[in-house]
Image (spheres, grey):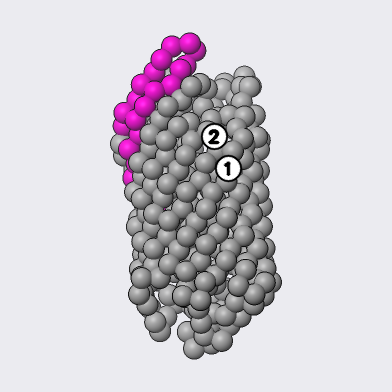
Amino acid sequence: MVRGRGTSLWTGCAAFAAAFASPACAQSIEPRAYSPGPVGVNFLVLALSDTDGGLSIDPSLPVSDAKLSVRTAAVAYVRTLDFWGNSGKVDVIVPYGKLSGSAIFQGEPVERKVDGFGDPLVRVSVSLYGAPALNMAEFRNYRQDLLVAASVQVSVPVGQYDGSRLLNIGANRWSVKPEIGVSKALGRWIVELAAAGTFYGDNDNFFGGRTRSQDAIYSAQTHVIYNLPSGIWLAANATYFAGGRTKVDGIPDRNLQSNWRAGVTAAMPLSRRMSVKINASSGVSARTGNNYDLLGVALQYRWGGGI
């Protein structure tokens, strides 16, 4: 079991900020997404990421030979809550990105250089089993065993978007991502598994005013985490996502996704209130534009809840 007294248990409470380094949320790799924390704690996170290679913004776009660079900065806020006696949290992420590079569209090269805000993400997470809502004094004696939790994340389409261009930072459509996760502590080890579906609204201004729809993308991710006595933790991560075929004005595209990504994460406390996290991932097998590399870092500050 893992004791709540260890800083390593809840440096994961704002894990999403480093995960957002993947601009397409269906592809995110997020260890310790459901790690509980004391009720009433606030987290402020600054995350920076760099992706190079394929279509990290949207692997289903109708281009080939993409050579894109996306630099992203995200500011996030999280608060841990009591949901009817169960531990939970609400988080909001606001990204800003800079995209540059080239790709091939219908046999012709296209180039793009743009910066602006991405689509904000709002998520609500709640523990279903194994993580009751606790204050700071109670949480010091908490020991994780088996934990089951669920979340719903919504992407709000207010980011940068130009309907006359193929490559944008925002998506000009709503998306909703429900997820359920299981985490099991085995001494200093934690093994996690999560399954999700990302469901998309229509983009009614796609590349010249056309309507683009997309089937749901279903994903699974797993993590093996090791906690060091000093509060540092290390994770090996993998995710698989499939589906997501698109239609433009009702005409199906040949872009069914079936992609693997793998990566590593390391986190360590800097002080009682601050911690840092570094993550990296790469496309392992890609049917569509998942062949990009990612490197991200996140700095987390926490306050409240009796810290």
**Mark 2, residues whose alpha carbon is within 10 Å: few (<14), some, or many (≥20)?**
many
Looking at the image, residue 205 sits to the left or right of residue 27; the answer is left
Q: Residue 290, which numbered label?
A: 2
Task: Kindly tell me whether residue 153 is visible in this rendering.
Answer: no
Q: Is 223 rendered above or below residue 162?
A: below
Q: Is 223 rendered above or below residue 68?
A: below
Q: Position of residue 50 (x, y in %)?
A: 38, 43
Q: Element under label 1?
A: strand
Q: Is 267 rendered above or below residue 212?
A: below
Looking at the image, residue 186 sits to the left or right of residue 38; the answer is right
Quadrant where the image shows the N terminus: bottom right
Task: Kindly tell me whether residue 225 is visible in this rendering.
Answer: yes
Q: Element under label 2?
A: loop
Q: Earlier in the sequence, mark 1 or mark 2?
A: 1
The answer to whether the residue labelled 1 contacts the one labelled 2, judged by CB atoms less than 8 Å apart, is: yes
Q: Which residue is mark 1?
A: 261
Residue 110: say if magenta: yes
Identity of the amino acid at label 2? Asn
User: Which residue is rendered at x = 51% and y = 82% of the image?
Assistant: 5
Q: Which range is magenta?
A: 93-114
Identity of the amino acid at label 1? Arg
Residue sitting farthest toward the front: 229
Q: Position of residue 296 (x, y in %)?
A: 41, 50
Q: Main secondary structure of the magenta part?
A: strand
Looking at the image, residue 253 sits to the left or right of residue 12; the answer is right
Q: Position of residue 8 (x, y in %)?
A: 50, 72
For this rendering, which residue is in front, 305 or 27? Answer: 27
User: Which residue is rendered at x = 54% and y = 79% of the image?
Assistant: 4
